[in-house]
Amino acid sequence: MQRIFVVEDDEEIARSLMRLLGSEGFGVVCASTQCQALVMLAQEQYDLALVDISLPDGSGYAVCTEIKRLKDVPVIFLTAFGDEASVVTGLNMGADDYIIKLFRIRELVARIRVALRKAQPGLSVVEVGDLRIDLAGGIVKKGDREIMLSALEYRLLLVFCNNPRGIITRERLLNELWDSAGEFVTDNTLTVYVKRLREKIEEDPSSPRIIQTVRGMGYRLGDGSKV
């Protein structure tokens, strides 16, 4: 289980993040002050940190610096400060991403998964049958031929790549696409996008082996092989 270190002094936000990330399969540990965060960093290992910039006894910038010195794991700033100077300062401190409150839940989870994936280069390519998805480069190939996907089709494919063993409900797909794309995706248009994606990546779209339908539940990522 991947562990997320949350440094947040707002108790309500911290509790919400613990519930949200816990429901996504992450282990979550929280600190509410700079001092507490630094002590915990010296004692335990984490895979990623979500750090608020404004802390009651200091700054999230100092926490980020210490994380990069000790652990060098991904750091995402989660803060109310959205001005350009704050963003640039955070990135120059070594942060991997910067999310402004109020954040969209699915977007936050997606960006956490992207940061974790980038920190593990061995997981940057997903292969399903003869389909090869280069997650770092955003390139999809079927055999030697590159497949051109629209932005929303690619995001849809990424949802399956990020959840290779689980059943993904239509409701979850709608939430993922809505939050990450900012587009109006309905249940009917989701069916259209799944159909279009299958037409591009499947050998036989009428009998899909990559994006498989689980009747009454949703979809799952297959292995691409024929039954």
Image (tube, rainbow, N blue to C red):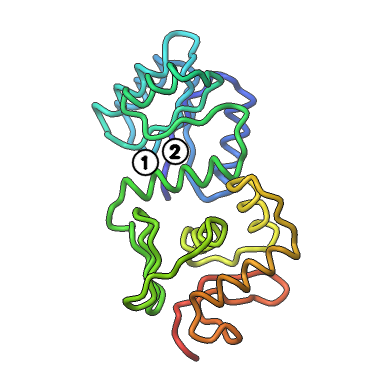
Give neighbour class at mark 2: few <14, some 14-19, many 20+ (Cα, 10 Å).
many
Q: Identify the residue at horizontal 49%, vertical 67% (top origin).
A: 165
Q: Identify the residue at horizontal 31%, vertical 28% (top origin).
A: 94
- Above or below residue 140? Residue 121 is above
Q: Which of the labelled discs sits on residue 47, or is there none?
A: 1
Left or right, 141 with reference to 33: left
Q: Amino acid at mark 1?
A: Asp
Q: Position of residue 107 (x, y in %)?
A: 56, 43
Q: Identify the residue at horizontal 33%, vertical 57% (top origin).
A: 124
Dividing the picture into quadrants, the one containing residue 190 is bottom right
Q: Position of residue 2 (x, y in %)?
A: 41, 47
Dividing the picture into quadrants, the one containing residue 90 is top left
Q: Answer yes or no: do the residues labelled 1 and 2 have beta carbons within 8 Å?
A: yes
Q: Which of the labelled discs sits on residue 4, or is there none?
A: 2
Left or right, 22 with reference to 76: right
Q: CA distance from mark 1 to mark 2?
A: 6 Å
